[in-house]
Amino acid sequence: MNFWTQLPKPFFALAPMEDVTDTVFREIIASGAAPGRLHVLFTEFLSVDGFLHEIGKAKTGHRLEISALERAILDSKGIKLVAQIWGSDPEKFHQTALRLTEKHAFDGIDINMGCPVKKIVRKNACSALIKAPELAKEIVIATREGTRLPVSVKTRIGFNATETQKWIGKLLEVKPAAITIHGRTQKMLSTGVADWNEVRKAVQLRDSLNSDTLILGNGDVSSYADGLEKSTTFETDGIMVGRGIFGNPAFFADPDVINQDQSIHLLKKHITRFSHEWEGRKNYAILKRFFKVYVHSFDNSTALRALLMKTNNFKEGMAVLKEYEAVKHSLVNLVNHNTP
Ligand SMILES: Cc1cc2nc3c(=O)[nH]c(=O)nc-3n(C[C@H](O)[C@H](O)[C@H](O)COP(=O)(O)O)c2cc1C
């Protein structure tokens, strides 16, 4: 079944982000999301070459893991999970789609046609497909022939220069269930400002062609309210949020603010869940990248973060947080006892 067509509009998705949107982070974000504010999650991107190769699979298979806890939360909230894949060989997309479908774990398959990283572009994959639209179309078709799940595409507005209509027009020919459009070219990487007028042009093109493909806008969405406004102004069916989540782990909550105690509580939960899922399999350094998500913009947050960054393992990280909480608690008690 094509779940995309069942979503209310505008719908919200958390962007696929390598080393960020693993099962643990997805679980945390999904569990804090208010009803109706988060509809679709994506895995980190996974190479079809790696997936179909024994050694490669052992190295990158973790990207497809879904914990029982995440599964339960997604099921209870009706949040969909899409596996994102990348590569350049249509046959490998076909084989990967067959196997992903057999896993019965995903609601959709998304093809990455946007990643701008040079070593990937050199392999004629991801954003390089913008320069090879016929191959891009073959890949969509080959993937779809390997699955009953809906197949979507995530891409940009051009390679060196903006060419939204030409490129999206090509993609629409093969009728993806949805296209996410990040309003930057490959050349821009993550610099400058996402051009949402180009996203709107894609929507208008879709409408003029009477196509059923849904369009998600992506780029610089800073809050849930900003997403709602952008979807109205630029007429998108959906909104995808990437780095906005780094500034606010309560992005999809209502109200979408959390206080210092709640932030620390979430970080402790993240450390506990991360160590449970990944201890011995993923480096502690990957977890360290999340500290700034939870520890910022409150009194002494910079100092606390510096202490956390010096830790070497889960136990040390938790110890710093517990000590911080104890000191803070004592300070509050001291002030209360001495306030007339
Ligand atoms: C750390 C990081 C990892 C990313 N990994 C992926 C990925 O695996 N697949 C993908 O399609 N895009 C990836 N992206 C791009 C985001 O999905 C998104 O398109 C981009 O950040 C723009 O949206 P934003 O301005 O809301 O962050 C990544 C971005 C970041 C910051």
Image (spheres, rainbow, N blue to C red):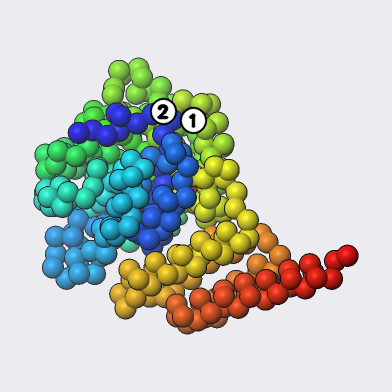
Mark 1 neighbour class, 10 Å CA radius: few under 14, some 14 to 19, many 20 or more: many
Instruction: Please state the horizontal and vertical placement of residue 57, each as a whole percent of the image.
Output: 19, 65
In the image, is residue 195 above or below residue 211?
below
Residue 231 disc label: 1
In the image, is residue 231 above or below residue 326?
above
What secondary structure is marked by label 1?
A: helix
> Which image quarter holds the C terminus?
bottom right
> Which image quarter holds the N terminus?
top left
Provide the residue designation for mark 2: 9
Q: Which residue is at 63% across, 60% downward?
A: 260
User: Which of disc 1 and disc 2 is earlier in sequence?
Assistant: 2
**Amino acid under disc 2:** Lys
Q: Nearer the viewer, residue 149 or 168?
A: 149
In the image, taking residue 296 as reference, residue 159 lies left or right, namely: left
Q: Nearer the viewer, residue 47 or 226?
A: 226
Q: Are marks 2 and 1 in contact (CB under 8 Å)?
A: yes
